[in-house]
Image (cartoon, grey):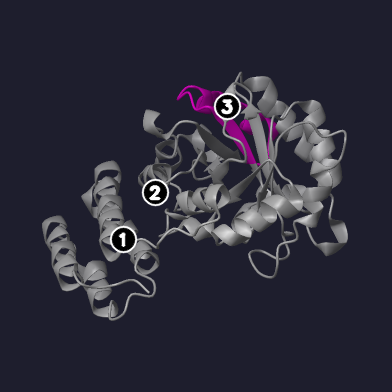
Amino acid sequence: MIKIGKIELPEHPLLLAPMEDVSDPPFRRLCKMHGADLMYSEFISSEGLIRDAIKSRMKLDIFDYERPVGIQIFGGDEEAMALSAKIVETVQPDLVDINFGCPVKKVVSKGAGAGVLKDIDLMVRLTKAVIKSTHLPVTVKTRLGWDEDSINIDEVAERLQDIGIQALTVHARTRAQMYKGHSDWTHIERIKNNPRIKIPIFGNGDIDSPQKALEYKERFGLDGIMIGRSAIGYPWIFNEIKHYMKTGEILAPPTMEDRLEAAKNHLIWSMEWKGERLGIVEMRRHYTNYFKGIHGFKAHRQRLVTEDDPQLLLQIFDEIQEFYKDYVME
């Protein structure tokens, strides 16, 4: 059993990555239904929380059926990070996670996310400020380093553990790689094998199948795996991995009916949480992923992404279901 503070996770848990504009409550609900063991909010700007920005505050919404669930914050100012952690504590998540890994320019240019990888002393100060300001377990998600010539994850892991973080997730790429090229888990394996490291170490990057998940589990010996982009439009991946690890068998892929049900629920829950208009618009980016590889789906997708009326959208789902009632997944 893996422990983070008082949180008890199963052996080799599967975590859902915090993904901007993806890991909201409707998406997390689907992933929880399909086997995710620990989930995180979209990352939240510490400055936005302090300014009471509506979008930032909305990201604090968590629900009991999601637990255990963490709220992830990012920022480059110690005082702002400490204050935002206190705000986060008021909604009673199970943990606070700090993002030191986001590679996008608008975050890095503010000295936050992966930008902090250039200054480990600052990373330590920011983390310490959060730990001192909350009673919740504090965890960190980061990358290997800024670029291939400055991989510093070994020092990061030791120093952050020494000041009190209770788990570390490493995306096995540098900031320079963004999301391209191959991830290199040997660096995370080295951290896990460091006799000084006692906290759980989770790996993230390129896990896109049950076979690869099992291979990486056996090869690198980490405490668990975080799944990110592979879960978008495919929440079934969590249970597929668990089943394969337990039995060595590959589950049958989700049927067309399964996919339609998941996408329809995602839409309904998005409208309930965000309001009809925003829920409909922001759901449009997900249809391609839910129905990837389905023959002849382009025309149906076009209807889904252009219809604004919620009742007509639900009717379209029913029509698609009838159209594909005899469809067999390959």
Q: Amino acid type of disc 3? A: Glu
Q: Position of residue 189 (x, y in %)?
A: 79, 49
Rendered residue at 77%/32% (across/down): 125
Region in magenta: 75-98
Residue 109 appears in the picture as rendered: no
Q: Helix, strand or loop at disc 1?
A: helix
Residue 44 appears in the picture as rendered: yes
Side of 122 relative to 235 (left or right): right
Tag nearer the camera, 3 or 2: 3
Tag nearer the camera, 1 or 2: 1
Residue named by callout 1: 259
| The quarter of the displayed image where residue 2 is located | top right
Q: Is residue 289 above or below residue 73?
A: below
Residue nearer the viewer, 217 or 262 = 217
Q: Is residue 38 above or below residue 311?
A: above
| The quarter of the displayed image where residue 324 is located | bottom left
- Sort mark 3 into few (<14), some (14-19) or many (20+) by Cα contacts within 10 Å: few
Q: Helix, strand or loop at disc 2?
A: helix
Q: Amino acid type of disc 1? A: Arg
Q: Amino acid type of disc 2? A: Phe
Q: Are marks 3 and 1 in contact (CB under 8 Å)?
A: no
Q: Are marks 1 and 2 in contact (CB under 8 Å)?
A: no
Q: Helix, strand or loop at disc 3?
A: strand
Looking at marks 3 and 2 on the same chain, the residue that comes earlier in the sequence is marked by: 3
Q: Position of residue 20 (x, y in %)?
A: 50, 52
The disc at residue 8 is: 3
Is residue 23 on the magenta stretch? no
Residue named by callout 2: 27
